[in-house]
Amino acid sequence: MSAYGIAVDLGTSGFRGQIIDLTRNKVLKTVITARHPLPGANVMDHLNFAIDAGPEIAHQIIISAINQIIELLSPPPGELERFAVCGNPIQLSLFENIEIRDLAYAGEKYKEKLGILSPDRGAKEYRADTFPLLSLPNKCRIFIPPAVKHEIGADALAMLVFSGILENKKPSLAIDYGTNAEMALKVGDKVITGSAAAGPALEGQHIAHGMLASPGAISDLRPENGGERCFILNKELEPVEGDLIELKNGHLLASGSLKARGITGTGVIAAVSRGLSTGLIKLPHIVADGEALHLCGGISFNQKDLSEAGKAIGALRAGFITLAAEAGLGVEDIEVAFMAGASGTYVDALKAMHLGMVPPNAGDIYQVGNTSLMLARDIIQNTERLTYLDNIAREISASHCMFAFSKVFEKAYLLELSYWTEGMPWAMFQKFAAMYHLPPLPSLKTKVNITRKVIRDISDIGEGGLITIEQVGEIRSWAIPGCATCGLCVEECPELALKLDEAQGIIVMRMDRCLGTACHRCEHVCPENVFHLSQFWQKSSKIEN
Ligand code: SF4
Ligand code: SF4
């Protein structure tokens, strides 16, 4: 008798799912989505969307994306017994369709006034029929790992449990390098967490030629014979040699074995690092031909991409400066770094350190993979782990620093923005940091031990390989009353999320492409003042998959 389980990680830039043969304890296949199905570029946008459009709608879109994953994982009919899902508190709450407003507002009095109570975010086990929209057989049980505290989610627990930071005796920092960068500083028995809305650039999104870590993505650049060798992820998500090019003009010096389709987050980090090292980036400008770095296969990295990457890198460094200040440490006291997530795994750790994404005095760096998916898989393979995880979550003495309300973060991030986007010299950065009483940043350690614990962020993709869903979630269409079918909203959309069906007078939106509440450009450009984003989300007459 066979039995199967599905593990899903609800990441902020996309979902990842795996089917596991429980009798053989073997991963069979992996499916990832190229984007997050909800409108928005980060977790706060997703939260705003859910509050704006209604949590029911957000829940429905998330479930329909998961159903796409389940369909492609194709469990044998009737033999799917377990389903586990991990992610940050916002994604998991939207999956469960429970209260989310407690994650949107910080003031206890304000929440009390609105009658908002934090729901139970401990470990849970559900029957499949609790989620009637989810394509699971009735006998399947659904498992959700616990949050450490309601705002320190299961994904942070996964990073703590699987990175190895909890066993480390030295002051250590773990970061999950994603759109929403979860981070934890451990000093003695105390853990302080935070999460920096780094934005999607370090996952290869909102970058002109960006893509997630999937086959065809440029993942690294290395100097070779006066040029730069591009490294490209193959079907097994392993980096292989692509073309050797001249970064300043894209001239081909030697052909590689694989062609590039785009650039992923680690390629972005490599481009910035190599641009700075070769003098082709003089912050805040790219000084190469066409104000862009030229990678292989016509893929370029432009001025806007540099600015997006700089903001993300700056948010990370401002984050660990803030955690160090919270712990009463200097940044130089952080001796060990754990790098999780796809970017944290594939990135050249020294390049990341060069840019400021790793504490400069860390002598030991461990690259540990996608810990959130590991946790979901762990539960699928042994459901008793849920009790163990619940105990660990209770035992961890953790506190959370809300960066959104931290003066230290505010000052540090302001300096980062000045450095990355306005060209503030490094000496000036340090001077202002001292003036603001921020923990000083030491110079880079010269001897660093790097341990890559896994070869891929998803360590085992299974014999069935990896499938990427390029279009995820829902497409909605709406015959907007009063629409003059001028098409201006379609032209204005920076993400090509909209289409106009002139014959039928309807606007069609790909929800996974929309930037959500942070954008509204379609709304502002409408001459008839009839395009209302939130109404579009709620009143769309037709939903297609
Ligand atoms: S213009 Fe409108 S549809 Fe396009 S990304 Fe912005 S909000 Fe979304
Ligand atoms: S901009 Fe306004 S009037 Fe023009 S097509 Fe879009 S919704 Fe219709």
Image (cartoon, rainbow, N blue to C red):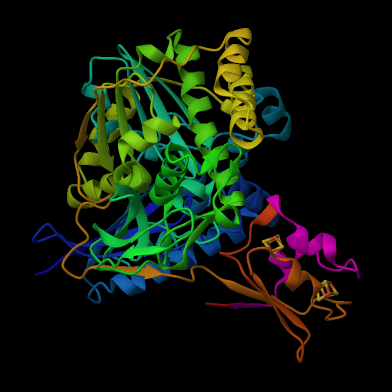
Asked whether residue 206 appears in the rendered view, the answer is no
Name the outermost residue toward the right: 528
Q: Is residue 134 above or below residue 49?
A: below
Where is residue 434 shown, x and y percent of the image?
58, 9
- 136 to the left or right of 313: left
Nearer the observer, 340 or 56: 340
Verify whether residue 431 appears in magenta.
Answer: no
Q: Is residue 172 above or below residue 183?
A: above
User: In the image, residue 187 lies at what x, y percent?
Assistant: 34, 13
Where 129 sits versus 226, above or below? below
Give the side of residue 308 with respect to residue 76, left or right: right
Give the image quarter of residue 161.
top left
Q: Residue at x 53, y 26 (%)?
A: 318
Comparing 75 with 221, the one in front is 221
Residue at 59% across, 24% down: 425
Q: Can residue 280 be seen at all in this image of the molecule? A: yes
